[in-house]
Image (cartoon, helix red, strand yellow):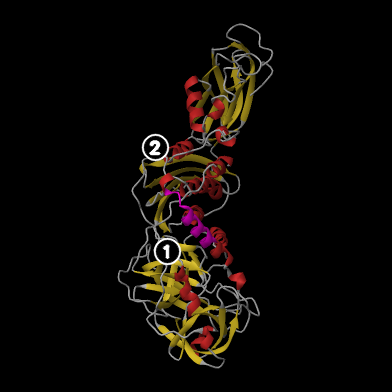
Amino acid sequence: MILFRLLICAFVLLFAPAEKLEASVFNPSVSVLEARALRAGMKGYALTVVSGREIVRFPVEIVSVIPGKGIPRHLIMIKASGPVIEKTGGIAAGMSGSPVYINGKLIGAIGYGWNFSEHTLGLVTPFEDMASVWNWPEKPVSIPPAPPLGSVEGKKDIPTAEEKESEEADEETSENDDDENLVVPVPAEPSLSPLFIDGISARKASEIAKILGGGRYIPGGAFTDDIPVEMNAGMSPGDAITVLLAWGDVTIGATGTLTAIAPDGRFIAFAHPFLGRGAVNYPVARAYIHNVVPSMEAPFKVGSPLKIVGTVTQDRPQGIGGRIGYFTPSISATLVFSDGERSVKERKRFHVVPDPFLGGKLTAGVFTGLIDDLWGRKGQGTATLTLTVQGRGLISGWTRTNMFFSETDLAAAALKETSELLEVVFLNPFAEVYPLGITVTTEFSSLPKLMYVEGVNLKGESFSAGETIDVEILLRPYRKKQVKKSFQIVIPKDAAGVCEILVRGGGIEPLNQSAIIQGWKTIDNFRQLFTEMSALETNNELILEFNYEKRQKGGRGRGEDEEPVSKEEQELLSELKQRRLKDGTLQIFKSEFVVEGLLRKLITVKPSDGSANSDNGETEN
């Protein structure tokens, strides 16, 4: 809907900068050998996990050091060998981050390979490049005190010029320093961390995989409904790890290998970006590897997260970095699903990473994927859906209920609005809403619960301004007998000439945010944001409007004492609806059906002063 885009476009996105932890040098617990000291033929070994949690080693030999001008600056070509590599079929996806040692010194980690090639050959990202992920400051999620709902929040959080310049430089570096800067003879495949998605339908899993920058994913999930936290975890180079985006009854993440740990608990891993989103807050878990699957395209590990051990705070072109023992808050989401025809009710819970630009898309996608599986079909039907948002700054939470009908794909149609609303909540410019809880309660049915507007009857065609009119509306529930519903509508005292009575279903030619569209007003505080979202029409509403062209006090045109823009044009949607409901020119009836149809009825209104009004009588609104 255009309103959702307007709500976002009307805002200047002024997110409060999270508290920054200054960049610092990463010093691993082992000795390091720089890439410039390497020569072809030098031999060493790499560490990884190919089954369970056991770290194994396999021999490697330096083939060459490939110079480059991007990031990473150089790549080290290696050839792997030995029984482990023979069993796996070569360097496997999931070995990204596997530390490589020459003469007992760390040179970097396996980061790249080639599909449909000789899988014993791979590329190592040098340690000095990987360690440079710590040249950027971290931005941990902080939970400041909740702002007053009625205030204009966010002004105190406007970044200073220095902060803006720093953040813009950070974003520019993150965008420019991507995998396209790699200078290698043949394009290498950077996706050596298998993305796995479990717990949702295949079609939504594929869509989420594309959102995350890839088209492929493998099945795999956690051993339990939720992933516990392991305090004071003892991690070692070569351990299998999983970076999580969602966990619980749904698991989304990527498996790789831990490269090195510093005495202060910081680590580096993967040797290539995960999503390349810069300063992040993604949980990292210890992983269990079920097996390595050989493949002509590229072998890959199949793993499952075991326990959350820390947080990834850096996601850069050179690799990822984070902290063991530091745990970030998350977004809690719950789906309560009911199948009205089977009398079945199920509940699913999951967590999502606290990323405002990613969390909304992930959450809505997961909800849709869960419904696909729980309903067991894709097709026509009717759904009633209630979205509840609770969090910091929302004293009693915010709730919206709507009904949806689709002839082809009900789950996608029902969750489209939820996705748009969550985008507005996540990207609101006034206040962080963490901790945040999202609940979707829905009832699905394959039956078309529809009601059609079939007729509008009035007692007469000519009325006087200020008069109250009885309106009879003819409605037909899907394949049932026609029913009648009576309303009253008030003719405003300044109405005259040809006017219109409009009867329609909610969301069909809806009242809109004309004040925002025309630029007369904007939403300027947290409370107003949710007030305007509550004012949105719902599909189960039967709406009756009286529309007319307002007469100006001075006859033709505006008088000298009148404002150039009427107050009505400057009203937000909530203000417009409240005024019209109060003056009787708008009636709203909530039904148990999705209301379809729109009918207009023209009437003639005599002006309240008894004078003719030919200037305005020919105009419809």
| Residue 302 visible from this viewpoint | no
Position of residue 315 in the picture relative to residue 66 (left or right): left
State the image coordinates of residue 620 (x, y, percent, origin top left).
66, 22
Residue beneath label 2, please?
150
Please give the label number shown on residue 12: none
Vertical relation: 164 (above or below) 72: above
- Closer-to-camera residue (38/341): 38
State the image coordinates of residue 124 (x, y, percent, origin top left).
53, 81
| Residues shaded magenta | 157-171
State the image coordinates of residue 607 (x, y, percent, origin top left).
60, 10
Mark 2 belongs to which amino acid?
Gly
- Closer-to-camera residue (619/197): 619
60 drawn magenta: no
Mark 1 belongs to which amino acid?
Glu
Residue beneath label 1, please?
138
Vertical relation: 588 (above or below) 69: above
- Label 1 secondary element: loop
Neighbourhood count class around disc 1 (C-alpha, 10 Å): few under 14, some 14–19, many 20 upward:
many
161 drawn magenta: yes
Q: In the rendered view of the protein, which quadrant contains the C terminus?
A: top right
Q: Are marks 2 and 1 in contact (CB under 8 Å)?
A: no
The CA distance from mark 2 to mark 1 is 32 Å
Q: In the rendered view of the protein, which quadrant contains the N terminus?
A: top right
Position of residue 122 in the picture relative to residue 151 (left or right): right
